[in-house]
Amino acid sequence: MREKRFRRKSAGAGKYTYIFFDWDGCLADTLGIWMELYKRSLSKRAIQAEEQAIVRELFNDWSGPARFGVQDVEAFGREIIGGLEDRIAEVTLNVNARRILERLQEANKTTAILTGSKRSFVQPVLAREGIDPLVDLIVSLDDVMHHKPHPEAVEKALENFDPVLARGERSKRLEQAIMVGDSSKDIEMGKNAGIATVLYFPDKNRRFYDPEWLESCRPDFVIRDFWELVDMLG
């Protein structure tokens, strides 16, 4: 994958005020848990699928089970959510996730987690890790009508942070926001909202994501470690 580093655009580094992060596979090391739960629930229904197909169709897409032939979609979803909540104690943060959130706070940046997970899967981990004061807002599955890659989560976050912004200044607000995520849907959501995008792609995510597939989404930047975001801050 061709990497596009923040240092290559350092002239505009300081313009980002709103830094949005995905949770699963991005700040949190949870992709393996999701994969195990999906495989188990599919197997219970005598449905076999390769991991890449599960990633493409099910990760970040609550409408995906129907495409796999799941008949009891609502029950399937409840199984996955219940399984996630049962395994909260296993969730750890990805390398340098805490450090970058601390640095963003020191730099007076505004942060949000925009996630397709329920708040009940995210908030306990933030509290346990002691990083909830470092996150200004969570927009979760509970808060939106439309899931990624629809831009609703981005729009809700921006409106929360600046609800009285004059209509004529909307483009300026969009220029100040950037979305950091590990999946194609994160990148597409950012693009659909009109903001810059960063693909977080550590080596361990190669098990789940095909680099060429992610590259086809044309993220503005690609990083392997969160500390690379410091270049963006100047």
Image (cartoon, helix red, strand yellow):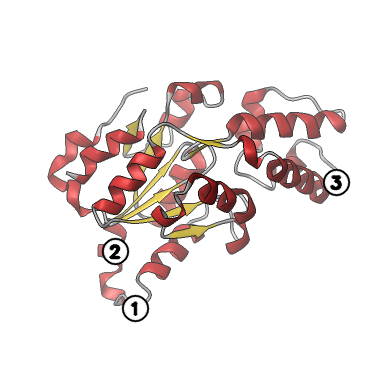
Residue 145 visible, this orientation: no
The residue pinned by badge 3 equals 72
**Residue occupying image coordinates x 28% and y 46%:** 103
Mark 3 vs mark 1, CA separation in Å: 43 Å
The residue pinned by badge 1 equals 164
Crowding near the residue tagged with mark 3, few <14, some 14–19, many ≥20 C-alpha atoms within 10 Å: few
| Residue 213 placement (x, y as % from top left) | 48, 28
Q: Earlier in the sequence, mark 3 or mark 2?
A: 3
| Residue 61 placement (x, y as % from top left) | 63, 45
Q: Nearer the viewer, residue 222 or 122?
A: 122
Which quarter shows the N terminus?
A: top left
The amino acid pointed to by label 1 is Val
Q: Earlier in the sequence, mark 1 or mark 2?
A: 1
Determine which of the numbered discs, if any, sits on residue 173 in the image.
Answer: 2
Crowding near the residue tagged with mark 2, few <14, some 14–19, many ≥20 C-alpha atoms within 10 Å: some
Mark 1 vs mark 2, CA separation in Å: 11 Å
* Of marks 3 and 1, the one in the foreground: 1
| Residue 8 placement (x, y as % from top left) | 18, 34
